[in-house]
Image: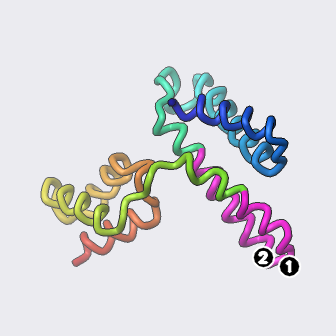
Amino acid sequence: MPLKEQVAADLLEAMRARDPVRTGALRLLRAAIQSYEVARTDKKHPRFGEEITETDLISVVDKEIRQRTESIDAYTRGGRSDLAEHESREIEILRPYLPDRMSREAIAAHVSTLIAETGRDFLAVMPRAAKELRGRGDGALINAVVKELTSG
């Protein structure tokens, strides 16, 4: 089932179960997806006119999880463990919508093939690695692996 339809079905199920945390998290995710779709209709958007793919929707889910992770850090520093706990519950609700993340070893293997094709130039390898691994691996981890393999 496509991600957008899965979120809608799960939201309906959460509302029927009267689960306020799950309902709230899924409503925010649905709103973020709709906002992304509207933004893509703007002629100023760099990807205007392109069809919205599952990878695009996965990047929206990833962004929502990143926002909540940053909120947890801020709430923890501010001494609001109750709000940090709420955000971490929302992360656990959203995480199943992401595909399994690639391990460091799998990313390194993919980057090694890119280095074999393009050479050890970071500026040549990183854009290709970021594009090909988008949604399948953590961006910071991909960047670290590319730096490590191109410098050595």
> In the rendered view of the protein, which quadrant contains the C terminus?
bottom left
* Relative depth, front residue between 127 and 104: 104
Q: CB of mark 2 within 8 Å of CB of mark 1? A: yes
* Relative depth, front residue between 125 and 32: 32
Is 82 a magenta residue? yes
Image side of residue 104 versus residue 39, left or right: left
The residue that appears at 59% across and 34% down in the rendered structure is 6
Q: Quadrant of residue 124?
A: bottom left
Residue type indicated by callout 2: Thr
Q: Quadrant of residue 44?
A: top right
How far apart are the two marked residues, 2 and 1, measured between alpha carbons?
5 Å
Q: Residues within 10 Å of mark 2 (few under 14, many from 20)?
A: some
Task: Give residue 76's mark.
Answer: 2
The residue that appears at 27% across and 57% down in the rendered structure is 125
Residue 71: percent from left, percent from top: 74, 64
The residue most toward the front is 17
Task: Give residue 102's mark.
Answer: none
Q: Is residue 48 above or below residue 54?
A: above
Image side of residue 65 versus residue 101, left or right: right
Residue 8: percent from left, percent from top: 67, 31
What range of the chain is rendered magenta? 61-89
Determine which residue is flagged by label 1. 79
Image side of residue 129 versus residue 61, left or right: left
Image side of residue 68 versus residue 21, left or right: left
Q: Is residue 96 above or below residue 109?
A: above
* Relative depth, front residue between 84 and 115: 84
Prevalent SS, magenta region? helix
The residue most toward the left is 116
Residue 148: percent from left, percent from top: 30, 74
Q: Residues within 10 Å of mark 1 (few under 14, many from 20)?
A: few
Is 45 a magenta residue? no
What is the secondary structure assignment of the residue under circle 2?
helix
